[in-house]
Amino acid sequence: MFSQAVLDHFQNPRNAGELTAATTRIQAVNPVCGDVLQLSAIIENQVIREIRFLCRGCTASIACASVLTESVQGRELLELKSLTPESLAASLGGLPPASFHAATLAYDALQELIRSTEM
């Protein structure tokens, strides 16, 4: 059902945990399934220097949060506009249609993180 990449990111999540020195912290919720994703990041000069996540959700949500943090760490915020739910899912070898909501949750969380830096 899930690709090896999804299972690997679920079983060995990258960048999981809290980032106490975060300069920004957001929380995104999928109201349909109840998954919750929190991102905390240190952003300096419009670059994500460090990012961590906490996720309460399904296998795919944890995997998408993990791959998202790997994809954005060290990158400029402007570069991140090219990320989409589809590109996140593709970087995990695809997601079953019933699990695609996980990629959307990760994408929505990233967008909220970017918006929070514009305030």
Image (tube, helix red, strand yellow):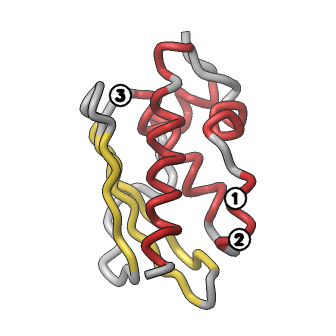
What residue does disc 3 label? Answer: 58
Relative to residue 74, is residue 53 drawn left or right? Answer: left
Amino acid type, label 1: Lys
> Where 22 falls versus 58 (above or below)?
below
Residue visible at 34% across and 50% down in the picture: 28
The amino acid beneath tag 3 is Cys
Q: CA distance from mark 3 to mark 1?
A: 26 Å
CB contact under 8 Å: marks 2 and 1: yes
Q: Quadrant of the C terminus?
A: bottom left
Instruction: Say few, some or many: other residues with alpha carbon within 10 Å of mark 2 (under 14 / 14 to 19 / 20 or more).
Output: few
Which mark is first along the chain, 3 or 2? 3
The quarter of the image holding the N terminus is: top right
CB under 8 Å between discs 3 and 1: no
Residue of label 1? 81
Rendered position, 79 above or below 29: below
The circle on residue 78 is 2
Q: Position of residue 110 (x, y in %)?
A: 51, 57
